[in-house]
């Protein structure tokens, strides 16, 4: 990575060494570690560490602290290129995931979770910035869809092996975590040596910025982070606690999500390109209102496991439409704002994530259905905010309240 190549000259490199290929490699490597950790987590903490709703809430609060501190990326990129930071973070995620099963206690799990979370959140912050810098605005929606599909395809292999081999081979949490985390770490090391450092044409501002005209984007990020926590923390926990799902059954559910993502993520990218961010996000948030209300109905009306599993898949698919939030920002942003705003937005996204899991963990002990009703309210708020997005957002026309952007001078 000692060689620097301007982005405009990257097309002269072999296809496998170009920026888009690097994005695809990283997109495939990250979820192998993170998604495997997520798939095994609920069974691991319940069976090995005896977690209840309160403990799982605290675990996810700790996991989200590095996301809240993602703004620190701005300070780090003063001394380290974003591409280097992204790969170092990916390596940390892989190594921490690999040793997760070595610490089967509340304190140990919280510590190793914090380390893997630093890797995950700093990688995600930088990766989002690199995607928006390296992909042009016309190609971005479709390419982001394909990047989502690539991550799903890579993880599909890992999950398929877990489902097929967990019981026949008597696999353990330690073996699976070591293999998944080791794969991600190996890809990160390969990318460090195989790719030059790509120089984007627009230097990034290396200080924290908060621009008034990005206010709607900030609010949507905040609501997305709050709403996402309820799905990530409690939807999967429900499948294990209420319906008694075992490891291979939870992983099978994840497999269905992956196949759905592989099929529909590119179509979702195309939908954003064709219908625009406003329509796409309105559709997503309206769907999530219905999904979360139905989750609540599982507890209030005793609806069964088949509906719960179906909602879990639909929920996951709707979240994939969040790529529209990325392209909305890409369209309204000054080119030099992308890296610092990605860090600021990631921090905003995680404000609620720091306290919601712990607080809702206590509410879960009293009324699990109320947790999902709260999520439905959050999705409804996001729906109202999405209606403020213009059909064709651009600098100066960030919301329908800001009026149309002035026509360029002739």
Image (cartoon, grey):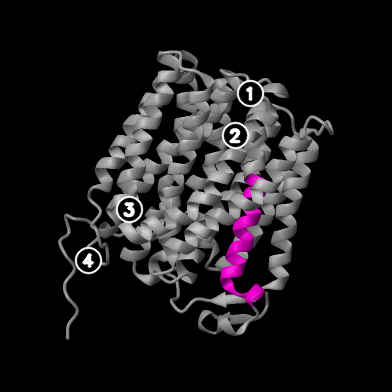
Question: Is residue 99 visible to us here?
Answer: no
Provide the residue designation for mark 3.
Answer: 217
Percent x, y of residue 140:
44, 65
Range of the magenta residues?
A: 15-34
Provide the residue designation for mark 4.
Answer: 396
Tag 1 or tag 3, which sits nearer the N-term? 3
Provide the residue designation for mark 2.
Answer: 253
Percent x, y of residue 81:
57, 69
Q: Residues within 10 Å of mark 4 (few under 14, many from 20)?
A: some
Percent x, y of residue 299:
45, 16
Provide the residue designation for mark 1.
Answer: 245
The reply to whether discs 2 and 1 touch (Cβ–Cβ < 8 Å) is yes
Whole-number angstrom distance, CA of label 3 to CA of label 1: 37 Å
Q: Residues within 10 Å of mark 2 (few under 14, many from 20)?
A: many
Q: Residue furthest right?
A: 169
Q: Is residue 21 a member of the stretch shown in magenta? A: yes
Considering depth in this image, is 251 or 123 the residue closer to the camera? 251
Residue occupying image coordinates x 17% and y 59%: 402
From the image, state whether disc 3 or disc 2 is nearer to you: 2
Residue occupying image coordinates x 45% and y 37%: 315
Whole-number angstrom distance, CA of label 3 to CA of label 4: 14 Å
Tag 4 or tag 1, which sits nearer the N-term? 1
The reply to whether discs 4 and 2 touch (Cβ–Cβ < 8 Å) is no
Q: Is residue 259 a member of the stretch shown in magenta? A: no
Secondary structure under tag 3 reads: helix
Whole-number angstrom distance, CA of label 1 to CA of label 4: 50 Å
Residue occupying image coordinates x 75% and y 33%: 103
Question: Hey, which quadrant is residue 344 in on the image?
Answer: bottom left
Q: 4 left or right of 165?
A: left
């Amino acid at each position: 990575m000692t060689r620097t190549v301007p982005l405009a000259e990257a097309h002269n490199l072999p296809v496998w060494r170009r920026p888009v290929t690097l994005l695809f490699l990283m997109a495939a490597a990250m979820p192998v570690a993170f998604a495997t950790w997520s798939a095994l987590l609920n069974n691991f903490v319940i069976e090995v560490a005896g977690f209840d709703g309160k403990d799982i809430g605290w675990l996810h609060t700790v996991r989200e602290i590095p996301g809240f501190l993602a703004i620190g990326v701005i300070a780090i990129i003063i001394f380290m290129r974003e591409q280097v930071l992204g790969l170092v973070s990916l390596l940390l995620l892989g190594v921490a995931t690999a040793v997760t099963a070595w610490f089967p206690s509340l304190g140990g799990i919280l510590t190793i979770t914090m380390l893997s979370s630093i890797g995950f959140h700093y990688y995600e912050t930088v990766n989002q910035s690199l995607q928006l810098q390296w992909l042009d605005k016309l190609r971005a929606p479709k390419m982001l869809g394909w990047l989502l599909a690539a991550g799903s395809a890579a993880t599909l292999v890992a999950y398929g092996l877990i489902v097929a081999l967990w019981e026949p081979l008597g696999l353990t949490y330690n073996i699976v975590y070591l293999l998944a985390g080791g794969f991600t770490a190996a890809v990160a090391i390969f990318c460090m040596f195989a790719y030059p450092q790509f120089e984007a044409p627009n230097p990034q501002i290396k200080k924290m910025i908060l621009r008034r005209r990005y206010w709607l984007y900030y609010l949507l990020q905040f609501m997305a982070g709050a709403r996402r926590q309820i799905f990530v923390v409690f939807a999967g926990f429900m499948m294990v606690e209420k319906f008694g799902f075992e490891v291979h059954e939870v992983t099978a559910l994840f497999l269905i999500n992956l196949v759905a993502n592989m099929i529909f993520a590119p179509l979702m990218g195309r939908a954003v390109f064709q219908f625009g961010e406003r329509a796409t996000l309105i559709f997503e948030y309206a769907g999530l209102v219905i999904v979360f209300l139905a989750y609540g109905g599982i507890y209030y009306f005793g609806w069964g496991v088949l509906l719960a599993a179906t909602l879990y898949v639909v929920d996951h698919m709707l979240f994939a439409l969040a790529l529209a939030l990325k392209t909305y920002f890409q369209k309204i942003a000054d080119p030099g704002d992308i890296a610092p705003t990605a860090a600021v937005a990631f921090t905003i996204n995680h404000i609620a994530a720091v306290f919601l899991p712990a607080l809702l963990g206590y509410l879960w002990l009293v009324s699990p259905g109320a947790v999902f009703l709260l999520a439905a309210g959050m999705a409804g708020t996001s729906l109202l905010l999405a209606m403020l997005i213009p059909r064709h957002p651009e600098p100066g026309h960030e919301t329908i309240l800001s009026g149309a952007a002035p026509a360029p001078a002739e």
